[in-house]
Amino acid sequence: MTAAAMSLASLTRTYENTCPATESGTLRLRGAPEVKDGHLVIKPVLVSDNSVFGAEVSGVDWSQPLSKDTVDQLVRVQDRYAVLIFRKTGLDNERHIAFSQQLGEQEINPFFYGRENDRIGEPFLWDVGNINLDGTLVQPDQRRWQHSLGNALWHTDSSYHQQRSKYSLLLSHGNPVKGGSWTHFADMRRAYADLPQSKKDELEGLIVEHDLWHSRKLAAPETFSNPLPHELASKPPAYHRLVQTAPNGQKTLYLAAHAKLIVGRSLEESQKLIWELMDHCTQPKYVFSMEWLEGGDMVWWDNRQSMHRANPYTTSMTARDVRRATVIDDGPLAHGVSVEERTAALKGN
Ligand SMILES: [Fe+2]
């Protein structure tokens, strides 16, 4: 390993070393009171003086298509809490996709190669579980295992797309083994708000290059130091501003393990700042961990104002069948930074 690679490796934070064991693995309800909003009951997860993040929501009748009024209400709740958890929805693939379509245009799973080659058989759903087509569990010698290791790094989905994704909706099928299946979330609005003003001034206007293959290489260097040519061609880097405005008007950080370069800075300088910020944003006070309890549990998060990560695959893991629908961003920041803006930034304009 080169000195530069060793230096980058030492900056990488993974599932094991980001969150202390005593802090992870718990949906930490901080005693915040339930909120009633029409027919919805909302239990906030992380509450501070100036912020709320995450909520468990009940009162939605998932047995039939949702009305536009209910969808609009849920989007307002989503804008406020950024991560919504629904238990025992009873949704199947078809209704999962139908609800996601009510939220916007769907991303097509780029790894879908026809129904006969896909365990789920739906181009709008990502298979992010650990089960092979033949029902066996994914093994370490599979490229899919190595690729999935990057999902255990803190990230936002599809930040490496020039038109990024807005929402992800992850639905559990079957019953996970209790204590064995978690997804972890970090509050990027509050993390930004708590930065000192001098740091906010430094970050304002910075442009970040996001590259899927950067996070794959960090997590699985043996496999992804040199991605296959068609892999590289399918996912070129994308450019987005680091400091953005969240749907509720607060400023937020748009950050992920996919973040490779700050435009105008060296790789090492960029990674130092990026992982300094990742460390800041993923302190236990900004993070909660959601346990998957039963089939039908669903979590819907906003990639524009949160980061998340999965548990990494292990050889002792149990079967986990989770499927993700992804909604493309159509907002004012959806398309990131243009070539002209990047050129101007490099010239210092
Ligand atoms: Fe993800």
Image: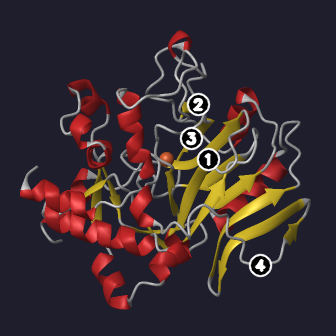
Task: Report which residue position mark 3 lands on.
Answer: 326
**Residue 181 — which label?**
1
**Residue 31 — which label?**
4
At horizontal 35% and vertical 55% (from top left) the residue drawn is 257
Q: CA distance from mark 4 to mark 2?
A: 35 Å
Mark 3 vs 1, N-terminal side: 1
What percent of the width, then of the height, locates residue 205? Answer: 31, 72
Instruction: Give neighbour class at mark 4: few <14, some 14-19, many 20+ (Cα, 10 Å).
Output: few
Specify whether tag 1 is near ligand 1 (CB below 8 Å): no
Front residue of this view, candidates 88 and 252 = 88
Q: Evaluate whether residue 250 shows in this view.
A: no
Instruction: Give neighbour class at mark 1: few <14, some 14-19, many 20+ (Cα, 10 Å).
Output: some
Front residue of this view, candidates 121 and 223 = 223
Q: Evaluate whether residue 349 shows in this view.
A: yes
Instruction: Give neighbour class at mark 3: few <14, some 14-19, many 20+ (Cα, 10 Å).
Output: many
Mark 3 vs 2, N-terminal side: 2
Q: CA distance from mark 3 to mark 1?
A: 21 Å
Q: CA distance from mark 4 to mark 1?
A: 24 Å
What percent of the width, then of the height, locates residue 176? Answer: 68, 40
**In the image, 92: left or right of 203?**
right
The type of residue carrying mark 2 is: Leu
